[in-house]
Amino acid sequence: MNKVVIFSFFYLFTFPLFAQEVKVFHLSCEYRSNPLGIDAVQPHFSWQMTSDQHNIMQTAYQLLVSKSLISLKQDKGEVWDSKKIISGQSIQIKYRGAALQSAQRYYWKIRVWDNRGKPSAWSETALFQMGLLSASDWKGAQWIAYEKLADSNVNVLPTDGKKDKFNGNNILPMFRKEFAVTRSIKKATAFISGLGHFEMSLNGEKVGDDFLAPGWTKYDREALYVTYDITKQLKKGANAVGVMLGNGFYYIPPVKERYRKLKVAYGFPKMICRLLIEYTDDTSVNVTSNESWKTAPSPVTFSSIYGGEDYNAGLAQKNWNQAAFNDSKWKSALVVNGPKLNAQKEEPVKIFDHFPAKQITQTANGDWVYDLGQNASGIIELQVSGKTGDTIRITPAELLKEDGTVTQKNMGGPAYFTYILSGEATETWRPRFFYTGFRYLQVKGGVPAGKENPLNKAIIKDLKGLHVRNAAPNVGQFISSNELFNKTFELIDWGIKSNMVSVFTDCPHREKLGWLEQLHLMGSSVNYNYSAAPLFVKASVDMQNSQLANGLVPEIAPEYVKFEWGGDMFRDSPEWGSSSILVPWDLYKWYGDKQALVNHYPTMQRYIQYLSTKANNHILSQGLGDWYDLGPKPPGVSQLTPMGITATAIYYYDLKILEKIANLLGKKADALTYAKLAVSVRNAFNARFFNPEARQYGSGSQTANAMAVYMGLVEEKDKQSVIDNLVKDIKNKNNGLTAGDIGYRYVLRVLEDAGRSDVIFDMNSRSDVPGYGMQLAKGATALTESWAALPTVSNNHFMLGHLMEWFYSGVGGIRQDENSVAFNRIKIYPEVVGDLTTATTSYQSAYGKIATDWKKTADGFEIAINIPVNTTAVVYIPVSASQSLAEIHNAKFQNLGTANGRTQVAIGSGYYKFKVK
């Protein structure tokens, strides 16, 4: 009989008489801390709370918003005083005060009341600054350019394989404008967009620490602008602003000797800018882009998001971005048209890790190869000295040939960096408008410092890789006693980081495209690791902007190319387009973002209507199916799972999710329509694909059976048999996986839900079959495109990292209750399987830090748990009939009984440590 020891248990929300106040912290507006450039007219606020007591819940809050920091310090919210609101809501609070004004900075703070009836102290002050809410708020700023692309050469959606309309390189311009600051400055703000990308400077110093700004978009629908606080970079008297432009995805030059995946041409580079200078005497002045700005070619002589970047330091004009520079030889800027502007909402791309060379070797042809030890998305930083005109060419690559030289066959080439020296003592250079994925750098034209240099070539004093990624904060950690799992975690994480820029890309080199299936399939893995909601919000807008008139959501967004290879196979796959429904739903489930559902509901409706018109007796058969599954042929289109299974399964799942969304939004008639159609799809799916004798779907592939179970297509009476067949297939294949990009996530989800994490452990604890272990055994340092780490395809890819989710939800046991939103109701269910003896896992949810730390001991099991304020949890602790359970700090918990070898305990917020012996 199971023995359960309960210490001082009265009821779940018991609290001490002298408990300390709850503290409010981590204030955010529209997901970000102290954001600039908010263009939501009713932004949303969130906060977190902490307490050293247990079982603390918020019961009310008061939020103050003020234009004046002084007023706010006096507890006055002259813009909005919510008064005391009786509510437990602490995330996604919609602003309901006076109309917010463009470019205005606001300050806010919050206090709460807890379930003891006590108010907290006021939080620290946070701020947000509005962006430009209408076109008139640009105060007459105009788009300006060096030159204009002829309308006949504009090509916003080229068809793959079609010939170029013209050939030739374009001018990469720089712009400058002098202006005077006449009085003492209170605050100065820059609102700027440069297409494809810009780098802004003031008085010779770069503005901001971002890279590849702004984020890339569907430019015929919108462009993004960035907001900077430039107060500290201005000075009284003469000032100068300078802007350099690169092509990005706005224009890909048709230069034959450089790699070019796409032929998109929205136009030549252009920019728009408004500098708002506010003086302490409450006057203000605007400096706006127009024909009075001067422009000239920059030292960047070639810029392609695919082909690389060339820089001629001999063409650099010293002090060009400072006051008193003689720009008489520069020409006046050309005023041009530009796209609609919206504020950039996602975190910027920034530089993170620095990778110096682990090894430098000389090749037979006299080049030098630098091994940085890590395959990552990045740029280079070169320090070099030499003669005027010396030329360094640096070729990045993921892999080496047998002779030790680099190969770009698997990642698209030729793509390279070129630097032409000015001849000064030591020159340092970083590219501004191109990034790629690489581990190796092959150098031609220079010799590493300290090496023999009989030809007196330029001396490479230093060459390193700089990892670039979206600056979404890290919110997750995982480490276990299984070293292969720890290495797999890092492998997948590098795949995520390397493909998280302003779009979730497939790879950082060959394509850099936003293939949509990975958004919903890898969404949970990303969200456990990074606070990436703003990036998923942008992805939803990209899908909205790329949706066709007939409702089709193409497989990539932003859609920069129409792939026609294989007909519509690479444009119309329901497993890809369904992200238009599933990503907003995930934003709601992970972050409580109901606004995302409201904003994108019309897109969802149009897409599901499109799918219904494509269905034949409710069956969808188009697309790629289980992409890159493991069959007898090289990976590609689904081999093991018949076409129609994955597409129809996700069609059904879309309908069930849309039914939930419609109910949430109060659209009852829509919900009934989707529910009714879902029944028809389910019946047709089972009639077409289910084998009642074999109790399996289609060919019985891992993907077919797993998706049928996960999506709820299987009749309850057959469910266990189908799961058993899934396990049997895995065991029969020597614990090997066969599912591909689409199916593997569902294999893992079904096995975890069925209590078969032991099978997941067995599948992923080896290196002799294709999978993560084999990738590591072959020397991969980032997740690869193929299960077997084939050298012919990308070796830094995003799509197959589904095991990351299991590390958190399975091994760490951090899950949501079925009816939870944003982890307000937590399920702690650690999987103690295989040879695992310890695991430490944490996830910083919207409410705060959820953490588990468990270990197997000689006589039992211990687990320490942290639950955030304003949430509750049920913990499922493995306890055998002969063991007892205790909370060793005498914290209160409620025993809910024992089932399936686990004792269930209900707990509130706080730190707990349970011991089983």
Image: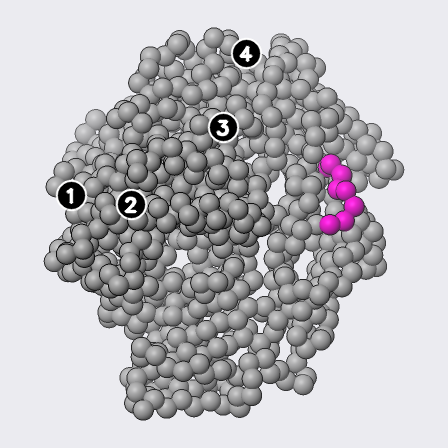
Between 186 and 820, the one nearer to me in the picture: 820
Range of residues picked out in magenta: 96-103
Q: Which residue was labeled with disc 3?
A: 218
**How far from the left and from the top, in percent, is residue 489?**
33, 56
Q: Which residue was labeled with disc 4?
A: 148
Three-letter code for the amino acid on which mark 4 is drawn: Lys
**How far from the left and from the top, in percent, is residue 861?**
34, 80
> Could you tell me which residue is drawn at 31 percent across and 23 percent down?
564
Q: Which residue was labeled with disc 1?
A: 631
Checking the image for residue 684, the label placed there is 2
| Crowding near the residue tagged with mark 4, few <14, some 14–19, many ≥20 C-alpha atoms within 10 Å | some
| Crowding near the residue tagged with mark 1, few <14, some 14–19, many ≥20 C-alpha atoms within 10 Å | some
Q: Are marks 2 and 3 in contact (CB under 8 Å)?
A: no
Between 257 and 20, the one nearer to me in the picture: 20
Between 489 and 828, the one nearer to me in the picture: 828
Q: Secondary structure at mark 4?
A: loop
